[in-house]
Amino acid sequence: MPKQIISSSKAPTTGFTDKAKAPPIVQAIKAGPFLYVSGQGPLDPDTKEVVAGDIEVQTRRTMANLVAVLEAGGATLANVVNMRVCLRDTADFPRFNETFRDIMGEHKTTRTCIGGTPHRKGVNVEIDCVAYLE
C-alpha cells in the first residue's frame, strides 16, 4: 500500500532548522485508512514565526494548523483517534485543557499530554495526531 504525502498551504511545515532549506518531514501522510499528522505548533502559516501570546493563543493557532492539515487529508476533528501533546510548562495544563475542550467540542479522542521542551524557542505547545478515514 503506497503512502500519500498530504500538504496544506494553510499550515506551516515544521521540522526546519534553517528556513531557507526544505524541512526533512512532511505535514501528513495518508496510509491506508489512516492520516498521520506531524506535530504542529503555534506558527504563522505565512511567516513560519511563532505567534506571540499565552498558552490559549498558542493552542488555538496550533489547533488551527492541525485542522488545516486534517482538511487537506480529507479529515476533520471528528476523525481523530489519537493526539499527542507536548507542553513546555506543565503549569499551563489547566488553561491548555480548557482551550482544547472548547476547540474539540463534542469530538472525543485519546490523548497523551507530556511536559517537555519543544525544539523551537517560544513554542509552548506542539500537537500531532492520527485520524481514521473510514
Image (cartoon, helix red, strand yellow):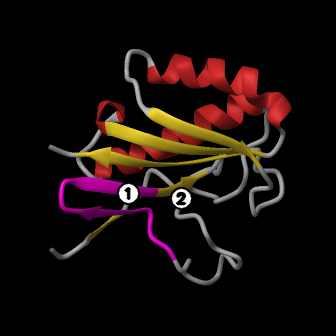
SS for dot 1: strand
Q: From the viewer's side, name the closer residue of 49 and 63.
A: 63
Q: Which residues are magenta?
A: 25-37
Residue 99 position (above or below residue 85) = above
Q: Position of residue 75 (x, y in %)?
A: 27, 42
Residue at (40, 45) in percent of width and height: 68
Residue at the disc numbered 1: 36
Q: Position of residue 59 (x, y in %)?
A: 64, 34
Residue 7: image quadrant is bottom left
Specify the amino acid type for callout 1. Tyr
Q: Position of residue 34 (x, y in %)?
A: 26, 54
Residue 60 position (above or below residue 52) = above
Q: From the viewer's side, name the closer residue of 62 and 110.
A: 110
Name the side, left or right, on which 56 lies relative to 36. Answer: right
Q: Earlier in the sequence, mark 2 or mark 1?
A: 2
Name the image quarter holding the C terminus: top left
SS for dot 2: loop
Q: Which disc is residue 12 wearing? A: 2
Name the side, left or right, on which 93 lies relative to 81. Answer: right
